[in-house]
Image (cartoon, coloured by chain):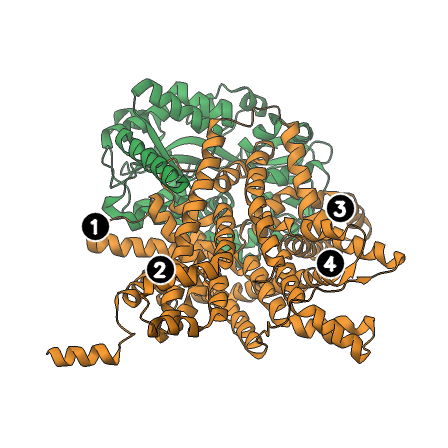
Amino acid sequence: MNKIYKYLKNEFFFGINTWNFLSILAFLFIFLPIFLIIYNFNIESENWSHIKENLLFGYVSSTLYLVIGVGLMSTAIGVGCAWFVTCYDFYGRKYIEWILILPMTIPTYIAAYSYYDILEIFNPFFNWSRNNLGLEKTIFVENTLIYLIVIFLFSFVLYPYVYLSSKASLLVQGSRAIEAANTLGIPTNKLLWKVIIPIIRPAVIAGTSLVIMETLNDYAAVEYFGISTLTIGIFRSWFGMYDMESALRLSSFLITFVFLILVFEKFNRKGAKYDNKGGNNFLKRIDIKRGQQSFVILFCLTPFLFGFFIPVARLLTWMMRSDVNLIDLDLVMTAFNTVSISLISSFIIVSLAFFMNFTKNYFNNNAIKKVSQLVILGYAMPGAIIAIGVLKLNSSVNDLFSLIIIGSISGLIFSYAVRFLAIAWQPIESSMEKLGTNTNQASRVLNVKPIKSMVRINFPFLKKPLLIASLIVFIDVSKELPLTLILRPFNFDTLATFTYDLISQAQFFQSSVPSLLIIFISLPAILVINKQAGKKV
Amino acid sequence: MLFKTVNKLIILVCITCFVMADINVYTHRHYDSDKILFKRFTDITGIKVNVIKGSADQLIQRLKSEGKNSPADILLTVDAGRLVKAKELGLLQSVSSTKLLKNVPEIMRDNENQWFGLSVRARVIVYAKDKVKENELSTYEDLADPKWKGRIVVRSSNNIYNQSLMASLIESNGSENALKWAKAIRNNMARKPRGNDRDQARAVASGVADLAIINTYYLGLLANSSDKNDRKVAKKLKVFFPNQNGRGTHINVSGGAVTASSKNKGEAIRFLEFLTENENQKIFSESNYEYPLDYWNTKAKVHKKWGKFKGDSIHLSILGNNNADAVKIFDLAGWE
């Protein structure tokens, strides 16, 4: 018996131990809600044929229009701005470089409602066109316009994902590439297409896929503007027809979407592993002519103007115009709740991601490597679908142990972990890869205990990515709406749910203060991220 | 250090909530009137009201997954259909209260006393005074007439108020006619459905359309808004109660029920009774412009201005029973 045990222990020497066991256990626990969703994809329901015949095409096509539109536009803005601010020198460049990141603080639902009456500007035109061009044409123009507006709106608040990743990639690799291009005599006007884009492509695709996931996740904005995306369809079958099975089926389409994007991204990234050596020389920025300067400045200021300045200015005017007392104890408590739950969740989620990544790396554990690919699913699914998964898990646990896991702070943090582990995972994983397995193998050979290696070697090296991961999770949790709304404890509001509540009563004036607070709470975090992303790790 | 303090504070808050918990309410209602009502209830009875706000459907899913261990005592929704659904899922329990039976009209409560209406809303036509004459309007059915081509705005059929209206049309006219109606209305729309009921009112005021189908209390909110643009919108519009010579205007209730899992049944019933009392019915009308349960006797100023009306007398549980069919008919009619 002892022999068999020893054999097993030797065979899986680095396979089975407390670290691996705990990591896999944690992973399984977090993956359970997602598993319950996927498990239910295949259950046929009576409404499915109705949905397939009458609605599916519409859902998929409008989702496609939106995804393609927002994807292309935010990529154009993000790459364009990143290219200008890193490769060229122009008036006010330094300020423009950091204000460009600000729209990231604005959740799509707040952007949408700060522009809620934008279509009213066009009313005189519609009235004219109805009388002169006829109803059909007017409706067609209006529908096209709505798509355009939503695409612009989303792009103007989501492009920073592309902007940040492209900028970081350009900073690391741009200088040498441009130098080389200059030596080879490639003209400046061909630089972008021939040199820059091919080099930063993986970074761009990574940023764009985040933009697309955010777009797919949105419910409030598309609902308001009357665009029937897949996410709308999911809600409609769940709530209108009480048909959770069809809702889950529809979400499987959504997941397929995301999955394709992710495969595409992985595929692209594999082809171009960064070579980071010697990237330390600073980029010599190219001076541009006066006439071109104003174009560049205008190009860079437009997204800031529409994605940050106008929404914030509108919220501020609403705040000023309101005659009710906007700041009371409730609001202070809510702000306090938001900050504390975001801090705690971010600490827990990042620690978990660090622990699991370390285990994966230190013990070179294949099992964790394989399953870790699945954590991304949490971020890819809309928050409301994750909520279904958590509720399903809750009901299974409740059946088995007569225990309710939701409705407490810890239950809420757990659901955040399900949703946001992926975004903490990625920066940590990529930096761990840079650290290489060699370092940890060396500590193993030298008999350094794992805990010592984790704290003394890995932690100091990973301080920066850990900080960035914590800040991103912090921002995401503080903005999170659907999960919080449905899984929160009694008398618990975050700024996001508070805002939502006021908006659903159309109390725009009152909602301005919590919205502004959401924006200002994530502001410092975003500035730190921007600073870190500008440096080399 | 910060984490510890924060953690301790949160634990403290949780513990105090737990110890003082008297009744736990899951509610879809997100109105200021409720804050006033809950506070009044606590002041009078000493029973604290703990609240989770969310959409009724999600709250029902949550109740379902919590089963008999659910901490909830009360479920409040903004329509009868969701309560019917909750009853079907076995999430509610029958209560016996003569007060509730007396205060809530028969069509506005469950026949097994599992849920009760608490306030009434009417889905009416609002029209631009300068473009439509009152005598041109008659019924919901009449809006399908080609004379209204390009003149109507209504919100999306994702919305429960439209689904309930459709459910009542299915009941009165049959599915086939209801589908014909929905197709015709879709054809008569001045634009693709978008926005909420307020936005429809705004669209009529700005000349995009001549009339809209909305719930009455939205007009009350606009007329009493702190935004002067909203008040201007309200001034341009007039309310018309359809089907007065027939079955009456479509009405629905915002309602409440005691959950099957309730551990504080006595307090929960008291809470529902409290909400149906005269004094508190006034609060529904005065701060949220909803009609009281005896809407024909309403004393609120806004309501008097709109005039008296006859409400449809079908039992409201029918709205819940027909809901899924209503959604399908909207789908078939291409009403987004």
Q: Earlier in the sequence, mark 2 or mark 1?
A: 2
Q: What residue type is labelled 2?
A: Ile
Dot 1: what SS? loop
Q: Which of the chains bears the disc numbered 1? A: A
Q: Colour of chain A?
A: orange
Alpha-carbon neighbours of circle 3 within 10 Å: few (<14), some, or many (≥20)?
A: few
Q: What residue type is labelled 3?
A: Phe
Q: Nearer the viewer, mark 2 or mark 3?
A: 2
Q: Which residue is located at x 46 percent, y 49 percent?
A: A482
Alpha-carbon neighbours of circle 4 within 10 Å: few (<14), some, or many (≥20)?
A: many
Residue A222 in percent (x, y) is at: 58, 52
**Residue that mark 2 sits on:** A30
**Residue that mark 4 sits on:** A85
In depth, the one of A181 and A202 nearer the eye is A181
Task: Give the spatial CA distance, label 2 vs label 3.
Answer: 48 Å
Q: Which amino acid does label 1 sit on?
A: Ser
